[in-house]
Amino acid sequence: MDFYSHDIVDNLINVNRIYNDDGDLRKNEKLFFDFQVDYTRGEEDGDDEEDLNNLETRTVVETLEFDREWLFGGDRNRILAFVYHILDLLQVPCDREIVTTLTENILELKTREEISELPHVERLQVSMSVFVPTFPGEEEDDVVVVNFAVAPASDEAVEIHLDTVVVDENDRGYCVICMDKIRVGSDEEAGRMPCSHVFHRACGEEWLRVSGICPVCRAVFPS
């Protein structure tokens, strides 16, 4: 179990591992993440200080599943990019403690996967308590929400810089966007970004319409 606290605001994370307890050492192809996020929104007084007597909290519970082979097949940078992607989906602030906790837990599980005689971890239960200016999916006229994101790539840039490639043994693997396999000889086109990472082309185009960065290494896509 890991428990971290932010020095300025109480952004907390707690991670528990749920093990296979039936004696079967075979690993499930999927790893499940059970998220419970408590979002706390505080109002500001005239001195721009948080009014701790006027707080509102909402809780979101969501379970996500990912392919184990894909998740543990990457290096630290890819796992780090995966963590940023998950936090972005949950609209959770990317505080250092939260990012580090999730990244280190996944890296530890990756090492554990190499020891077959150990009972495998079926799921991670992740609870977070975070301060936010607005609740997910909610905007207020008086609140400016700053997202540290890169602008979407233009259609012209995608056409020029997202290369269509023939999938061979060097490009096969998993599409980090849809989590499905990139298969050799498939009729589905693959696309290679300037940073050399390969995805299903349709997935890459859809991703770049939302965010102009590579989901693996976070390299900025050319404008």
Image (cartoon, rainbow, N blue to C red):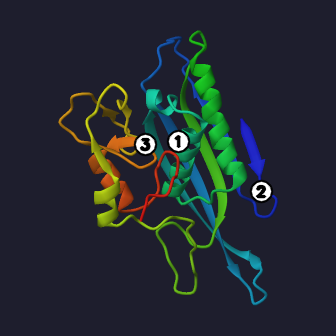
**Real-space Cα distance between discs 2 and 3?**
36 Å
Quarter location, residue 222: bottom left
Image coords of residue 37 (percent x, y): 58, 54
Q: Can you identify the residue that label 3 sits on?
A: 196
Quarter location, residue 168: top left
- Helix, strand, or loop for circle 2? loop
Q: Nearer the viewer, mark 1 or mark 2?
A: 2
Image coords of residue 90 (percent x, y): 52, 56
Image coords of residue 212 (percent x, y): 44, 60
Q: Can you identify the residue that label 1 sits on?
A: 34
Q: Nearer the viewer, mark 1 or mark 3?
A: 3
- Is residue 20 rendered to the left or right of residue 128? left
Q: Can you identify the residue that label 2 sits on?
A: 6
Q: Earlier in the sequence, mark 1 or mark 2?
A: 2
Q: Earlier in the sequence, mark 2 or mark 3?
A: 2
Q: Earlier in the sequence, mark 1 or mark 3?
A: 1
Please name the amino acid that badge 1 sits on: Asp
Whether the residues at callouts 1 and 3 have beta carbons within 8 Å, the answer is no
